[in-house]
Amino acid sequence: MLEFAILGLLHQSPMHGYELRKQLSEVLGGMRSISYGSLYPALKRLRAAGLISSDEPDPRALLPADAPPLTGRRGKVVYTITAEGKERFHELVSQTGPEAYDDGGLFGVRLAFFRHTAADVRLRILEGRRRTVEQQREGLRSSLARTRQRLDRYTLELQRHGLESVDREVRWLNELIDTERREATTTESTSSEKENPWGQ
Amino acid sequence: MLEFAILGLLHQSPMHGYELRKQLSEVLGGMRSISYGSLYPALKRLRAAGLISSDEPDPRALLPADAPPLTGRRGKVVYTITAEGKERFHELVSQTGPEAYDDGGLFGVRLAFFRHTAADVRLRILEGRRRTVEQQREGLRSSLARTRQRLDRYTLELQRHGLESVDREVRWLNELIDTERREATTTESTSSEKENPWGQ
DNA sequence: GTTAGCATGTAAGGAGTTACATGATTTT
DNA sequence: AAAATCATGTAACTCCTTACATGCTAAC
């Protein structure tokens, strides 16, 4: 998920880690930042996999063999997505399986990069998400119906609030799906833009 | 978090693992169950810590040293909370620090066992949670104000929906806090029930 | 010249998951 | 007697966090 988000951000423009982290917080929903302890190892893995490249100043040039073991001396490292990285990103962005809409935060990230996703794939993901959330809602509803008697007020309030939340998400998804379909039918005659609808 | 929930459920009545898992799903918000790969190691840890005890049938009695290494032969194991376990649970249930209301799902579990929490502690936790969520809301709001221009429709929708969600949570918390305060003032004259308000 | 914010990383650990392995009991 | 569901557990792994360690750069 993190790697997907990193690829997505670097797809837009090269960045160094610190900047990446700030952008990541926005993509991952306003507050709650990723920690450097996750970010840098992730960058390392992506670089090892050849999906991004790093432009390090590397200041070990023109230095005699110094006694201080050269612990510091780090330069600002700018990361750029590679051709393989872009390929991988478009592969990820085209996936329509459950991993795209089941729980675990990936759906939010997918949505954040939806402009890179083809219109039909967008629709399938939104509908998949809706199915998932509807099932959650059913589970919650039946759980509430079964246990309504023996639960105290707090647990009941918790479940009621949870139910309202998933209910709102379903309605929100319905709106997104409607808009998506309306766009699809009005755009199919004029064969413009397959990517980047609205925005920018 | 899991261990807290297990203690809370066993506090109500002894249970075996399988049953525990079902009850856990309800406590942890309707759908999304815990897996056995989490549950059984957690039970093992709690038993090792002396917080719960297990009542195993242990069928190795009256058996000669068999050649088959006795791989199967497991009985239904019933777990019971110990005196130390209850003590620990009431310790956890009285905590008012950030771990009780910051993100990470603990708040939901705390609420599920709120009837075991004293009224003043309940209020402090609810107010702490409200502060946390209000801060999230501020973060989201300013992030949205800053980036409204350069974001595409999907990211905007995502943030808008997120903002509405935290907004709803704040309103919900306000209601809970109001009710809590009303109960506190109407109950203080009649010195009844310090625990178990409503429910059961 | 010192504080605040920018910047990069590692090591250890927490809290769960999936996949596997096994068997008992109930229902059809 | 086959299938479903109840029941218990381990091993390997995922994905993140916190705490630590280090240094650069701009502003006051």
Image: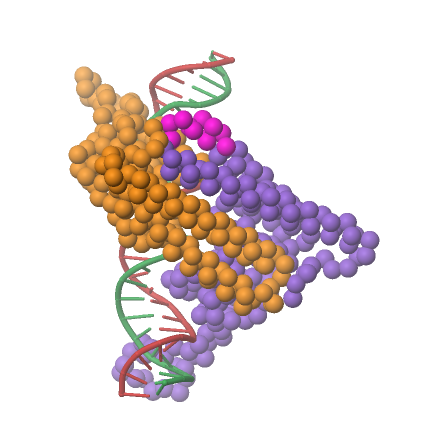
Chain colours: A purple, B orange, C red, D green
User: Can residue A98 be seen at all in this image of the molecule?
Assistant: no
B41 left or right of A140 in image = left
Tell me which residue sits at (19%, 33%) in the image.
B82
Residue A142: in magenta span: yes
Foreground of the two, B184 or A148: B184
Magenta region, residue range: A141-151
> Where is residue A118 drawn, in percent x and y?
68, 54
Residue B65: in magenta span: no
B146 lies above or below B158: below
What is the tally of numbered marks visible in this picture? 0
C11 lies above or below B126: below
Of the 4 image quadrants, the one containing the C terminus of chain B is top left
A200 left or right of B3 in image = right
Of the 4 image quadrants, the one containing the N terminus of chain B is top left
Foreground of the two, B43 or B68: B43
Tell me which residue sits at (52%, 36%) in the image.
A137
D23 left or right of A147 in image = left
> Where is residue D12 drawn, in percent x and y?
37, 45
